[in-house]
């Protein structure tokens, strides 16, 4: 299988999964549908298992690594600025597509039977939920947002303590290397996981279920596709003076894995290595990618909630005004961290609906097809998490353009995703992180 490209393995799993799912549905083979569900569920569970230690150690190490980066504060500020700019573009596009397509008009659904999802979001819950009452509890419950907060505080403290904190930092580096190695074993199972996830989706969600929501589903996929294949390439060309084809050649393994796994955090090691292969220095990539994996969500937190809010408003007969659309944009740009990089975008959607005063039960109407929507949303998220550090590195003059030009010329390997000794196949020098003169 090592001679068979990783991307082709996932594509094969996608095709076989769809075929088996169709067979299970048409033949009413409950055992096959159950097997596909179990295989896909185990793959996602294995990814989630690595999330708490991966997020914590990656952010702690990335914050401390900024010590050796010239103009670290400037790079961090530019990264956050581009996160906001691209999110604003994505949510504006989502609103525009929603106004053009009117996804909720003419939809025949039993709104009386709709109930609010168990997991909901509000500004109060979001703000108070950032700080954990029990640090151990954040890890046990897998609360990524709280883990990010703890990691940022601990990383900043270790950075200021300096040499005395080096043993602790080395421990985090070692744990990160171990977790990444173990996670790579899971990622190698992605073709099998893809087979199970896609197969279960096809078996469980037939056209009878999708038909009433076909217009909405199409709008979400079209919106994400435009961001992926139009907006991002335009930004690469205009802001970074970069060839978009080279970007997709280097970043495609991460985008592809994100589509099938539906987890930005689970895809994070592949995303980071892909970004490094694109020529972004490791010290900067190790900060930008983990941070983006938990806060940069153009699919889940921008396009989707914008379209979903318009859909829910139209289904329930609520008219939205200009102020409401501006509020959607504000919530998407500011509240995207609420999605926290895990599968699904229910928290962000309910946060948007509650801010607009729309019925939270409207989110329940979309739960049935959420896995189908989450595939393209997560792929868009991860593409954005790779685009921003690439553009920032190019604009700051620290991008290795030779590495960028050769990105994607070979398949990902174990050494690409995990360097247990902390070294990269392209050594990064401190001079690499010094911006070129303006």
Image (tube, grey):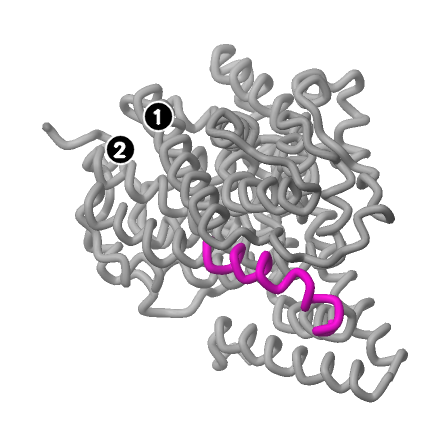
Quadrant of the rendered image containing residue 183 = bottom right
Which quarter of the picture shows residue 108? bottom right
Camera-side residue of 349 and 376: 349
Determine the residue positioned at 48% across, 57% down.
254
Q: State left or right for residue 177 relative to residue 245.
A: right
Q: Nearer the viewer, residue 138 or 61?
A: 138
Q: Where is residue 223 drawn, in percent x and y?
A: 46, 54
Where does residue 59 sit, x and y in percent of width and height? 54, 31
Decide: is 431 above or below 160. below
Which badge, 1 or 2, comes first in the chain's sequence? 1
Q: Which residue lies at the image location 52% right of the left edge and 57% below the top edge? A: 219
Please say whether residue 89 is visible from this viewpoint.
yes
Up the image or down, 427 lies above or below 411; here it is above
Q: Is residue 282 above or below residue 104?
A: above
Farthest residue, direction left: 438
Q: Is residue 370 above or below residue 91?
A: below
Dominant secondary structure of the residues highlighted in magenta in the image: helix
User: Pointers 1 and 2 in contact (CB under 8 A)?
Assistant: yes
Which numbered circle lies on residue 412?
none
Please identify the quarter of the rendering in which residue 25 is found.
bottom right
Can you identify the residue that label 2 sits on?
433
Question: Is residue 236 shown left or right of residue 191?
Answer: left
List the residue tagged with mark 1: 68
Query: What is the magenta range?
Result: 206-223
Is residue 211 in the magenta section?
Answer: yes
Residue in the image at 75% along x and 33% along y? 120
**Left or right: 314, with 120 as reference point:** left
Is 201 a magenta residue?
no
Q: Position of residue 308 (x, y in %)?
A: 61, 45
- Seen from the viewer's position, the closer of residues 213 and 283 is 213
């Amino acid at each position: 299988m090592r001679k068979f490209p990783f991307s082709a393995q996932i594509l094969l799993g996608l095709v076989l999964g769809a075929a088996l799912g169709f067979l299970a549905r048409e033949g009413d083979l409950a055992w096959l549908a159950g097997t596909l569900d179990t295989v896909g569920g185990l793959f996602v569970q294995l990814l989630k298992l690595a999330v708490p230690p991966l997020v914590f150690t990656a952010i702690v190490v990335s914050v401390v690594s900024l010590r050796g980066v010239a103009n670290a504060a400037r790079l961090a500020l530019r990264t956050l600025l581009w996160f906001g700019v691209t999110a604003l573009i994505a949510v504006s596009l989502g609103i525009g597509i929603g106004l053009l397509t009117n996804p909720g008009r003419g939809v025949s659904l039993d709104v009386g039977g709709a109930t609010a999802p168990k997991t909901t979001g509000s500004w109060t819950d979001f703000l108070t939920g950032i700080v954990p009452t029990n640090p151990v509890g954040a890890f046990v419950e897998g609360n990524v947002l709280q883990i990010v907060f703890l990691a940022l505080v601990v990383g900043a403290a270790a950075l200021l303590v300096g040499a005395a904190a080096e043993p602790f930092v080395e421990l985090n580096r070692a744990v990160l290397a171990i977790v990444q190695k173990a996670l790579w074993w899971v990622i190698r199972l992605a073709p099998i996981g893809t087979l199970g996830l896609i197969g279960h989706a096809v078996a469980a969600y037939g056209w009878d279920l999708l038909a009433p929501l076909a217009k909405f589903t199409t709008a979400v996929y079209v919106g994400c596709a435009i961001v992926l294949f139009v907006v991002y390439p335009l930004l690469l060309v205009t802001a970074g003076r970069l060839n978009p084809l080279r970007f997709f050649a280097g970043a495609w393994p991460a985008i592809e894995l994100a589509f099938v796994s539906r987890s930005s955090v689970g895809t994070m090691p592949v995303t980071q290595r892909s970004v490094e292969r694109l020529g972004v220095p490791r010290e900067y990539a190790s900060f930008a990618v983990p941070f983006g994996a938990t806060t940069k969500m153009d699919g889940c937190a921008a396009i989707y909630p914008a379209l979903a809010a318009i859909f829910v408003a139209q289904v329930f007969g609520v008219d939205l005004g200009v102020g409401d659309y501006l509020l959607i944009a504000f919530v998407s740009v500011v509240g995207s961290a609420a999605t926290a990089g895990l599968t699904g975008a229910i928290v962000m959607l309910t946060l948007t609906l509650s801010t607009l005063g729309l019925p939270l039960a409207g989110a329940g109407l979309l739960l049935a097809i959420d896995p189908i929507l989450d595939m393209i949303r997560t792929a868009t998220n991860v593409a954005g998490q790779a685009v921003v550090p690439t553009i920032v590195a190019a604009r700051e003059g620290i991008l290795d353009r030779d590495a960028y030009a050769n990105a994607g010329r070979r398949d990902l390997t174990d050494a690409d995703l995990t360097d247990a000794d902390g070294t990269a196949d392209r050594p990064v020098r401190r001079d690499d992180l010094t911006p070129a003169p303006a």
